[in-house]
Each structure stands twice: as C-alpha cells, then as structure tokens.
Image (tube, grey):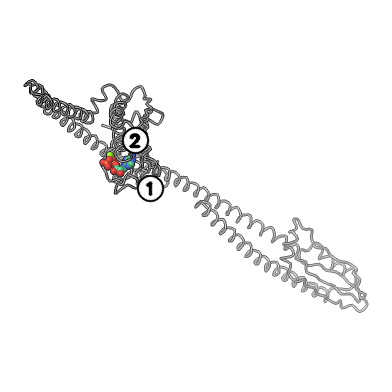
Amino acid sequence: MSLQLRVIGAIAALLILSLLAGGLMLSIHAHSLVALEVRTAFAGARQSVSDTLRSDVEHTVTLRQVVASFQGQRHVRAALVNETGKVIVQSQIGTLAEPAPDWFVRAMTPPTLTARIPIALPQYPCVVVLTSDPRSEIAEVWGHVRDAFVIMLLFCLATMIVVGLAAAAASRFLRRFRAALMAIGGGDYDARMDEGGPPEFADLARGFNHMARQLSDFSRSNRQLYAQVQSTQEEERAGIARDLHDEVGPYLFAIQVDAKAVAKTGTPEATRLSQSIREAVGHIQEHVRAILRQLRPVTQLEFGLEPAIADIAAFWSRRHPAVHFALDIALPAHLPQAHQETAYRIVQESVSNALRHGAPTRIAIAVHGGPDGLTVTVEDDGGGVRASGSPDSSPVTSPVTSPVTSLGQAGIAGMRERIGALKGQFEVQDANGRGVRVRATLPLAPEREPA
Ligand SMILES: Nc1ncnc2c1ncn2[C@@H]1O[C@H](COP(=O)(O)OP(=O)(O)O)[C@@H](O)[C@H]1O
Ligand SMILES: [Mg+2]
C-alpha cells in the first residue's frame, strides 16, 4: 500500500474513532440532562398540585381546572381518575416541533415517574395522577446533539481533505524526486528539480540539484580529460607510424636493392639467397603496412567509414579465409569524425577479439544510423567469453557507466572509454558460450560543451 494511502487511512481511522467517542460522550451527557430536566419538572408539578389540592379545591370544576392547567406542558401530563380507575379528564403535552428519531428516543428515555395525589373531598373520591413525559426534552436535546455531531463531522471531513491534499503534494514530490534520480542513474546529469514549494521539499530539491551539477561537472571534465588522452594517444600512434614508415621503410627498400645487386654477382647460390631475402623483406613490408594501417585509422578513414570497415574485414579475411565476414552498413549522410573514429576502433577491436579469443566461423558487422544515433554491432559465433579461458572471463553485460575492469583487459576498457566520451551506451553480451555480441550506440548531434 502506498505511503499516501497509509497516512490517509491512519488519519481517517483516528478521526472516525474520535467521532465515535465524541458521539458517545454527547449521548451520555444528553441522557443525564434529559433525566435531570424531567425529574426537576416533575417534582415542581407534584409540589404545585399538592399545594393547590390542599387549599383551593371545592368542587370538580376547580379539579378540572387543575388538570387543564397542565395542557401543553412540556414534561408532565396530569389526569383526573375516579375510584373505578376511569380517566375523567387528562392533559396533553405540547406538540413537538421536530420529534427525535425513535432510536434516539429509546436511548434517551429515563424511567417514567408517576405520582397519585388524593383529593381531600369525601364526596368526590378521585385522584390526580401525574406522569412524566420526556419526549419534548428529548426532541430538544436531539436538536443540540445532531448539530454538534454535524459540526464534528464537517471538521473531520475538512481535516481529511487538508491531509489528503498535503499527502498528494508530498507524493507528487516523491514521484518527481524518483524520476530525477532515475534520470541521473541513467547518465542524464542535466536532470534538475524545481526548487519551489515547502521549505523541506525545496531543501531536498536544492541538494539534488547541487549533486547533479557536481556530477555533470565531473562528467564534463572526464570527457575533456579523455579527449586529451585520446589525442595524445593518436599523436603517439602517428609518431610511431611515422618512425616505422620513415626509418624502417627505407632500410627495407635498401635491403631489397642490395639483394637484387647480390643476385647480379652471378652465382646460383647468391641468386637463390637474394630471392629468399627479397621474399622475407616483402613479408615484413606487408606487415609493416598492416601495422601502419592499424596505427593510423584517420588515414584509413580518408575515404569514409564504410571502406575503412570493409578494409578491416578484407585484412582479416586474408589471414582467416575460413571465417565468413558479413557486413551491413547504412550510414547517415553526415557523420562526425569522432563518431567515425570511434566506430572504426570498436569494429577493429571487436573483430580482433573475436578472432583472438573466440575461434568463430562467422563475424557479422553492422553499422546503422537511426533515431537513437549510430549503432555499431559486432557479433561472432565463437566460444564466447567463458570458453576463451581468460582468468577474468565472467559473462558481461556492461553498460558504459560500470567499472572498466569487468574484463580486466585494455581492449574493452578502451572501447568503453571512447564510447563514454561521446555519451554513448555500450554492452558486451556473452551468448552462453555461443559467441559474443558487442553493441554500442553513439548519440548523434551531441550537445555542445559549454565554453
Ligand atoms: N569475442 C570474444 N570472444 C571470446 N572472448 C572474448 C571476446 N571478446 C573479449 N573476450 C574476452 O574478454 C577479454 C578482454 O578483452 P580485451 O579487453 O579486448 O583484452 P585482450 O583482447 O587484450 O585480452 C579477453 O581476454 C577475452 O577473454
Ligand atoms: Mg582485445
């Protein structure tokens, strides 16, 4: 049950209890009030009839007048009764403006009081009988009790409405708070809360916004730092590539020229050795070219991402002819350089991982531009992460925000960092020993970094 319902339920139960207790107290008080009023009125009536009968009564007309004087009285009825018990004349109590309901009359009625007052006239053997009648008093008390109860009821309803509104406001705030926390958890550090409302909520919202701003700053400086690391790394790679090209390349060429010259010396042994030296140098040149390609993806991307990825597939296909490469590439018209480089590196590392660790027969590479951004998927049907025998080969589903050490090695960590720098999502899924699926989503048109 929600907190809001619990609070409202508990307060409603308390109010109903207090309403019942209040009603009970009112009833007890009203009951004793009715009894007291009726007793007092009855005693007064009895006294006045006794006094009248003792002094003034001379004939029946006067007796009738005594009885008639009770006509319309509120609490006592009088009757003149002869010696055979026959009622000669009787008064009626006043008509009730608004009688109380039967159940209230039953609950409030005190014991009936009766008095028989004999008449001191020997020739007239009658008695005056007085009887208490509480109905008029009960009707009056009913009016008060009902009004008091209605006021208590209105108070309870008003309290419930106020409590309900307060609980609804609190639960609205909690819902917004939860949504904002979920947004932060999902990596949206721009989530902010409205700082208005009651001071307690405003304090919480301010605290939340402060935390979100800090996280947003950390994330920005992280991205900047990573971009610096990346460019340093790229520069370093470019330097190594330059050295390889400029230092090793000429020497390899020189060896080939020398080998040709040696062949010209004429001996068959020299010709054979020269040929094998030139073949070995050819191999080394091819490897150096491959290494240069790996080191300088920017050069590879000169003709676009699609041919560059096709190049990776062709490169590995030559070395692993048994592995089938399936390419499915549909790129958006304008793809930023950073996205192209990241996509290239993801494909490069994932394909190399699949071949190094998974022994697959098929590798599917898909790169698509869609509403979510650029999606890069590399799927192999090799042995999966567990079968690769890595000491840290737990099955992984690693969102980009999780610690980078889940596989302990640099390749996956590097991919995750590159993708994080573009605010993307990343997961590596092991299909229970039937291969690995690497999937990255890079949001396109990322917001500009504030200066
Ligand atoms: N496609 C794959 N198939 C099987 N195992 C994989 C695959 N990709 C990654 N792995 C496992 O994850 C580990 C971490 O990969 P990575 O971070 O690229 O480091 P490295 O390739 O240098 O070992 C690998 O050592 C391997 O055990
Ligand atoms: Mg690797």
Q: Is residue 221 above or below residue 276?
A: below
Q: Give the x, y percent position of residue 361.
A: 36, 35
Q: Amino acid at mark 1?
A: Leu
What residue is shown at x 91% (from left), y 79% (from top)?
Answer: 122
Question: Which residue in the rendered view is the most extreme toward the left?
Answer: 265
Q: Is residue 126 left or right of residue 271?
A: right
Query: Which residue matches tag 1?
Result: 204
How busy is the neighbourhood of tag 1: few (under 14 within 10 Å), some, or many (20 plus)?
some
In front here: 283 or 348?
283
Q: Tag 2, which secondary structure?
A: loop
In front here: 281 or 291?
281
Q: Give the x, y percent position of residue 386.
A: 35, 46
Question: Which residue in the rendered view is the most extreme toward the front?
Answer: 268
Quadrant of residue 116 in the image? bottom right
What residue is shown at x 86% (from left), y 76% (from top)?
Answer: 119
How busy is the neighbourhood of tag 2: few (under 14 within 10 Å), some, or many (20 plus)?
many
Q: Is residue 355 left or right of residue 1?
A: left
Residue 424 has which mark? 2
Any part of residue 217 in sight? no
Q: Which of the marked residues, 2 or 1, is nearer the chain's N terminus?
A: 1
In front here: 269 or 355?
269
Q: Tag 1, which secondary structure?
A: helix
Q: Give the x, y percent position of residue 205.
A: 38, 45
Quadrant of residue 87 in the image? bottom right
Any part of residue 451 in sight? yes
Q: Is residue 378 above or below residue 177?
A: above
Number of numbered callouts drawn: 2
In front here: 57 or 269?
269
Q: Quadrant of the C terminus?
A: top left
**Of the residues tagged 2 and 1, which is closer to the observer?**
2
Q: Amino acid at mark 2?
A: Gly
Q: Is residue 217 left or right of residue 12?
A: left
